[in-house]
Every structure is written in structure tokens, then in C-alpha cells.
């Protein structure tokens, strides 16, 4: 058996009416390779009465990767970056020693009745890079390579597959692919022996080892096994993973670190709004306060 764990969809409220389905972290599986957090946001309709708004908030010790299926989001961060991310593009933000950012729909979106849907994930940084200087890189959709194999349309978001490499620069060995396939077609990814891997059903239904899995389910594979799946209906899946980090990671709210003491320090810095640590996001007046527990 190649499947080691099946994680069902779990809804979470990010506040301000924004609901997500969270797959990681899970009580029985905190990480898959270096991936430590996985949220499927939407689909949510932006209208004149509802704006997507994730107010300014901090991060340490991780990189965030935003990838949209539809719609667009305005990103702002304390480095002064401000730009829209569109469907099929990648925002890669490295928090390192500390960054703050916000994500929102812009006012004109309410007139377009835009639907926003996508994946937001966190990748824990190697211990040697946990305190690296914060940075932000954007990749347009045409920069992410695509290819067809056996009736499956693949997009290499990060990492390499079948000799096709994404330009997205990473801090540790990992992979992140999108596969779109019609009913009855089969996809396969021969995972490296040293890697962990998981498959997320973003849309549709796939069969793995004779079991059907629907939308929002995360299937974790045993290390070194082949990832094989068959579409029960037209489907979109995401396959991700990589080499596990040698040290355990602690996660509290938006902070990730190999050190509990470092997380405690970050709590104090954000609670006291020490802007020299996280910086202030331009044009943002409000922020998410430190949770009480």
C-alpha cells in the first residue's frame, strides 16, 4: 500500500467572513516534506457587499506560496511590494527573520462579481535559513512550464519533473505540481526515495488504490512510493512534497521555527508592534492583533 494517511477537509474561519479548507497541519501529520501549512480558499464571490480582506499580519521562519485557480488578489508587504496576483501565477514570499503582509480584493472587484479560489501554503525554511532577510518574488503564469503526458495536463509550479524545471527558487529540495485530467485518465508521479509526497483533490474525484477521494481530501503517500491516481470525473489535483527537514518544527499562529524561544520572541515583537522587526505594510491602517492563546 502506498497510501499512509487520508486527511478529510476541515473548514476554518480566517475572520472577516473568509472561510478556508485546511489540510495541514493535521494532528497525525504536521508536515509533508517541508510543507507545513495548506489552505484551500474559496471559491468565494467578491461583490459590492463582500470584500476579501486578510489584514496585515506577521510571519517568521517560512516561505509562503500563493497560487490561484481563479480571480485575483492584491498583495502588499512591509518590503513595499504591491501587486495583483492573477490565476496561474505564483507569489513566493520569504519571511525569514520577519515580514508582515496583507491580502485583499480591490474595490473594482465588487463590480465584476469575481470568484476567488486558490491554494495558500507555507514551506518551513531549513534551519540555516530561518533568519534570512525577508524577500518577495512574483512569477507570471507563462513562466511556469506545462506539458501533457498520457491525457494529463501538468504544470510544474515548483521543483522538477520529467526533466521540466520550474523557475521558482526554493530553499530545500521540494516539488509542487498541478495536474488536470479528464474522466478516466490516469496520472503517475514516481516519487524520489528520500521524499515525502501528498496529493490534494482541488476539484473532482480521483481513485487511488481502489478508493475514491473527493474534493478537499489530502492523501499522504508512504516515502518512496509512486503517486498514482485515476480521475472518476474531470478533476484537478495538486501533488507536493520533498525532503523532510532534519529538525522538528514548531508552529504557533503565523510563526514557524525550530526554536520555541524564537516563537516566543516573535509573539512579543508583534504584540508590542515593534515595527523595526516586522515593518509596516504601506497603505494598511489595520492589523490582526496577536491571539490571546
Image (cartoon, helix red, strand yellow):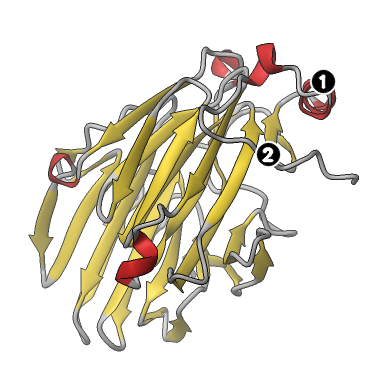
Q: Can residue 242 be seen in this view?
A: no
Q: Is residue 77 visible?
A: yes
Q: Which label number is shown at residue 206?
A: none
Instruction: Identify the image quadrant of residue 138.
Output: top left
- Asked whether the beta carbons under mark 1 and mark 2 sit within 8 Å of each other, the answer is no
Residue 219 vertical placement versus 233 (above, below): above
| Residue at 39% across, 51% down | 73
Between 6 and 53, which is closer to the camera in this rendering? 53
Residue 221 position, x and y percent, is 49, 60
Assign a secondary structure to mark 2: loop
Residue 293 position, x and y percent, is 90, 46
Q: Which label number is shown at residue 287?
A: 2
Question: In the rendered structure, which disc, 1 or 2, sits on the residue that comes first in sequence?
Answer: 1
Q: Pointer 1: what residue?
A: 265
Instruction: Identify the image quadrant of residue 132.
Output: top right
Residue 150 position, x and y percent, is 11, 69
Between 16 and 4, which is closer to the camera in this rendering? 16
User: Would residue 268 appear left or right of 243 to someone viewing this image?
Assistant: right
User: Would residue 108 appear left or right of 14 to someone viewing this image?
Assistant: left
Amino acid at each position: 500500500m502506498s497510501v499512509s494517511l487520508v486527511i478529510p477537509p476541515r473548514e476554518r474561519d480566517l475572520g472577516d467572513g473568509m472561510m478556508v479548507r485546511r489540510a495541514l497541519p493535521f494532528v497525525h501529520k504536521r508536515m509533508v516534506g517541508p510543507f507545513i501549512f495548506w489552505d484551500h480558499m474559496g471559491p468565494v464571490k467578491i461583490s459590492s457587499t463582500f470584500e476579501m480582506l486578510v489584514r496585515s499580519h506577521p510571519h517568521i521562519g517560512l516561505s509562503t506560496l500563493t497560487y490561484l485557480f481563479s480571480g485575483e488578489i492584491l498583495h502588499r508587504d512591509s518590503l513595499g511590494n504591491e501587486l495583483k496576483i492573477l490565476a496561474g501565477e505564483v507569489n513566493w514570499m520569504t519571511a525569514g527573520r520577519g515580514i508582515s503582509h496583507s491580502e485583499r480584493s480591490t474595490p473594482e472587484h465588487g463590480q465584476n462579481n469575481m470568484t476567488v479560489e486558490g491554494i495558500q501554503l507555507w514551506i518551513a525554511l531549513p534551519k540555516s535559513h530561518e533568519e534570512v532577510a525577508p524577500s518577495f518574488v512574483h512569477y507570471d503564469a507563462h513562466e511556469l512550464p506545462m506539458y501533457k503526458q498520457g491525457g494529463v495536463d501538468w504544470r510544474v509550479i515548483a521543483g522538477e519533473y520529467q526533466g521540466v524545471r520550474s523557475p521558482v527558487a526554493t530553499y530545500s529540495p521540494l516539488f509542487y505540481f498541478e495536474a488536470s485530467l479528464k474522466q478516466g485518465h490516469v496520472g503517475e508521479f514516481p516519487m524520489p526515495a528520500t521524499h515525502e509526497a501528498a496529493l490534494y483533490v482541488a476539484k473532482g474525484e480521483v481513485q487511488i488504490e481502489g478508493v475514491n477521494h473527493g474534493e478537499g481530501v489530502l492523501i499522504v503517500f508512504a516515502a518512496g512510493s509512486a503517486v498514482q491516481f485515476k480521475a472518476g470525473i474531470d478533476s484537478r489535483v495538486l501533488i507536493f512534497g520533498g525532503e523532510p527537514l532534519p529538525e522538528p518544527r514548531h508552529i504557533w499562529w503565523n510563526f514557524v521555527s525550530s526554536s520555541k524561544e524564537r516563537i516566543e520572541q516573535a509573539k512579543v515583537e508583534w504584540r508590542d508592534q515593534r515595527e523595526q522587526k516586522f515593518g509596516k505594510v504601506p497603505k494598511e491602517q489595520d492589523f490582526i492583533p496577536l491571539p490571546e492563546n
